[in-house]
Amino acid sequence: MTRLEFWQGNTACAEGALAAGCRFFGGYPITPSTEVAEHMAVKLPKMNGVFVQMEDEIASMAAIIGASWTGARAMTATSGPGFSLMMENIGYAAMTETPCVIVNIQRGGPSTGQPTMAAQGDMLQCRFGSHGDYSVIALCPASVQEMYELTARAFDLADRYRVPVFLMADEIVGHMRERITVPDKVGQTPRRELDRGVLPFQPDADLVPGFATFGKGYGVHVTGLTHDERGYPCATNPGVHAALVRRLVDKIENARTAIADYDIINPDAEQVFVAYGAPVRTVQQVLHDRPDGMIGFLRLRTVWPFPEHSLKMFKNAKVFFIPELNMGQIAREIERHVKVPVVSLPKLGGDLHTPPELVAALEAHR
Amino acid sequence: MRHEIRFSGFGGQGIILSAVILGRAAVMYDNKHAVQTQVYGPEARGGASMSAVIIDDEPILYPKVTTPGIYVIMSQEGFEKYGAGAQKNAVMVLDSSLVHSRPDCTCYEIPATREAKETLGRDIVANIVMLGALVAATGIVSESALEKAILDSVPKGTEALNAKAMKRGIELVAAAGKAQP
């Protein structure tokens, strides 16, 4: 059974989180993400959950890490300056392998920038923003329906790989209202508990250790310092550090195919768009208006780890066009993986690319 | 078929709520697709406010309004910023108690704020008068869908007042007739 709703993207995000079993939200309100927090503040106390408005985004990130170690599915939501403040503790979550979900409804930056306008300028920050080497997962919704579905999936991925998972939405998708079909129930894959007698940071074959939930009788030490498989600091042993960091990266990068979520449209085309988030909608319109099958489209829902194998499906591609609400952050990533020209189509200021703008780009490179 | 509707007025009139109600009516009660978007700044109130709705029988791809066919205008500044460029074949419903300019397109002059204040006793329901007028003028959603969406969206205890405001808007269209450019 499903039901029909006319929801805002941010409402759908909060509802998707609740349906996925999220029972802790720690956050600090900031436009254009505030409706996520508002909705969680209304709903969580009635569902045996906890909503805490923290003093800032540094503390918000710390709060969800703590909540996650008690076994809760935990989330925060922010934008722009708040996302920057979260960076140090995002690194702590990566190092301590703490499952958590961070929603970023992207707005124009740098700094306070454009609070009420859309952007996708944090795509590299979410991948590389904290210091040191690590890997994360980032999902990009392009509709209210996907705000619900991808938020729900983010919790499963966070638990599966013990990693911070980012829902990298934008103000357009976060604030628009549209038709959504809401399922009665969302399937959940629970976090795997640590087997008794196994060290708390000893990985399985998939490089992910079982989780030693606080209060369940495990002896576990959690630190941001380089640690051995017991969890104890071991910060001057080059071998231990190299192996730990390599595992934090490999557990995600090796699972690239399993994590990947994308659509391939018209794989024989010579001109190919690649898009994620709100610009997907413009590309969809262009393809709808030109149903000749001559324009290819790689439509990404997973951006990190980047599903580079998907680009290889366009065997006849002569040029890739990348419309983004930034100055070419993912275009730069795509350039690393293909031998044909990559045309970045940046758009700054908060407006979405229009269909004629994308058609003009196609004509200019024909 | 894709219909684009743009609402504008000043912050505090319920411009965004009007658009949300219209989108809700189309999706929840007329079984159509709709997307509602808005433009607003960091200010709390005042300033020109704009919200838009796209209604279609098919799923809506590009979510932004480009050439609106229907306008609902509730302030002079809103007219100048978001209504003055209306194409000749557009239809505009404007609050004639607040907007003194007139467009080059078909126009319904509805004294919504004055009627809300004098006939209904609360100027806060002017936006609902305008919604009633919009539906009477264009049939963009059904009257029953609009009424249900209004009743879903307004505070408890104000349902009767808002239903009356909607009906008053419908009557005003019949009384005003349309002014051709």
Image: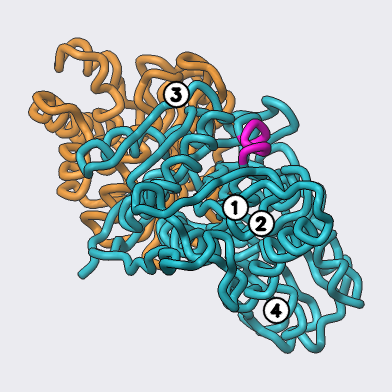
Chain colours: A cyan, B orange
Instruction: Please provide percent x and percent y for residue B113.
Output: 29, 17
Q: Chain of mark 4?
A: A
The verdict on a common chain for dots 2 and 1 is yes
Percent x, y for residue A325? 71, 48
Q: Amino acid at mark 1?
A: Gly
Image point (79%, 88%), residue name: A315
Q: Nearer the viewer, mark 2 or mark 3?
A: 2
- Mark whose residue sits in front, 4 or 1: 1
Tell me which residue sits at (41%, 54%) in the image: A218
Whether the residues at callouts 2 and 1 have beta carbons within 8 Å, the answer is yes
Q: Quadrant of the N terminus of chain B?
A: bottom left
Q: Which secondary structure lies at badge 1?
A: loop
Q: Are marks 1 and 3 in contact (CB under 8 Å)?
A: no
Q: Which residue is mark 3?
A: B9
Q: Position of residue A220 (x, y in %)?
A: 49, 50
Q: Residues within 10 Å of mark 3 (few under 14, many from 20)?
A: many
Within 10 Å of disc 4 (Cα), the crowding (few <14, some 14-19, many 20+) is: some
Q: Residue at x 23, y 62 (%)?
A: A3
Query: Magenta region: which residues?
Result: A83-89
Task: Read off the residue under disc 4.
Answer: A310
Q: Secondary structure at mark 4?
A: helix
Marks 4 and 1 sit apart, C-alpha to C-alpha, by 37 Å
Amino acid at circle 3: Gly
User: Nearer the viewer's eye, disc 4 or disc 3?
Assistant: 4
What residue would you read off at disc 2?
Answer: A228
